[in-house]
Image: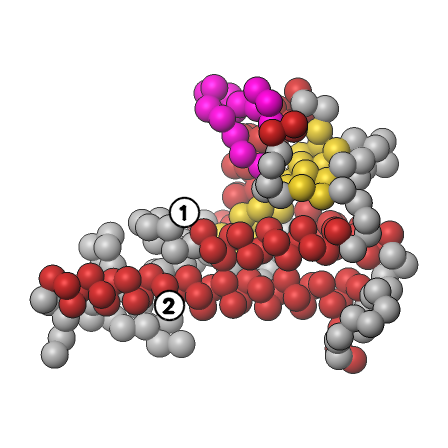
Amino acid sequence: MNCCTDIKCRCGKFPDAEGIHYLTCTHGNHLTTRHELLVKSFHEMVQVTSRHSQTKDLEDHLHGFTGPKGNRLVLDQVITGWTEDREDLALDYAICHPCARSYLPAAKDDDLGAARIRGGIKKGKYLGPCRAHDMQFKPAVLEVFGAMDEAALDLIKTTAALLSNELPEGTATTWTADSFAAFHSQRISMTLQRGNAKAIRLRAMRDLRASIHLGVAAT
């Protein structure tokens, strides 16, 4: 996918042809859909085990759930009785780009450097409040090209182990994804890349329409 590079992003910068700018720019809500698609994929994976997984309507878990500065926090997923001690597991997902300026120094020498930084930020935000609510917290971070941090991989492996790594009967798959872990790893990876493409297209089209409206688009 090649992006138009002669129309300014709403942040005032010109995007690059590979779409890196659109996947790192924080102006606008074009990355929200990608995040929601990712959460949905993990949620549906856990639901196969018949464990109770919530991604919305979490008020029972979040009553009085505030961060260090008193701000209200929102979690992406809570799985009831997931840990060995039957504690609830709280998860918050993130997608980060190793080419973003804030992650680049760490990503240069560490394959998961960007994910580790983002995960550390989320732990500082959610770990204490989750403990106060008797929940275990894990940040699940994926890098934009598909690499997953330990928490995301562990969730896939643990879910697969509950089903002996076997797919439910009748699951449509191919020989390359004939186990539960392989199937859902590929499904999540494809969801991420579709989300990337959708985010780039959405943002590029918005900028193009804005330029046409302002009369500065190339003719």
Please report whichever mark, 1 or 2, sits nearer to the chain's N-terminal start: 1
Tell me the residue that label 2 is attached to.
201
Pinpoint residue 123: horizontal percent, then vertical percent: 59, 34
Q: Which residue lies furthest to the front in this view?
A: 57
Please name the amino acid that badge 1 sits on. Ser
Query: Where does the magenta region start and end?
Result: 62-75
> Does residue 122 sit above or below 129 in this rendering?
below
Q: Is-magenta flag for residue 209?
A: no
Pinpoint residue 168: horizontal percent, then vertical percent: 84, 65
Nearer the observer, 116 or 77: 77
Determine contact: label 1, label 2, CB under 8 Å: no
99 left or right, relative to 139: left
Tell me the residue at 79%/39% (across/down): 82
Tell me the residue that label 1 is attached to.
102
Please name the amino acid that badge 2 sits on. Arg
Tell me the residue at 25%/62% (across/down): 207
Tell me the residue at 54%/34% (across/down): 74
User: Where, quadrant-wise, is the C terminus in this rendering?
Assistant: bottom left
Pinpoint residue 160: horizontal percent, then vertical percent: 82, 57
The mark lying in front, picked from 1 and 2, is: 2
Q: Is mark 2 on a helix, strand or loop?
A: helix
Q: Is mark 1 on a helix, strand or loop?
A: loop
Q: Which residue lies furthest to the right in this view?
A: 164
How many other residues sit within 10 Å of disc 2, few (<14), some (14-19) or many (≥20)? some
When asked about the image quadrant of residue 40, the answer is: bottom right
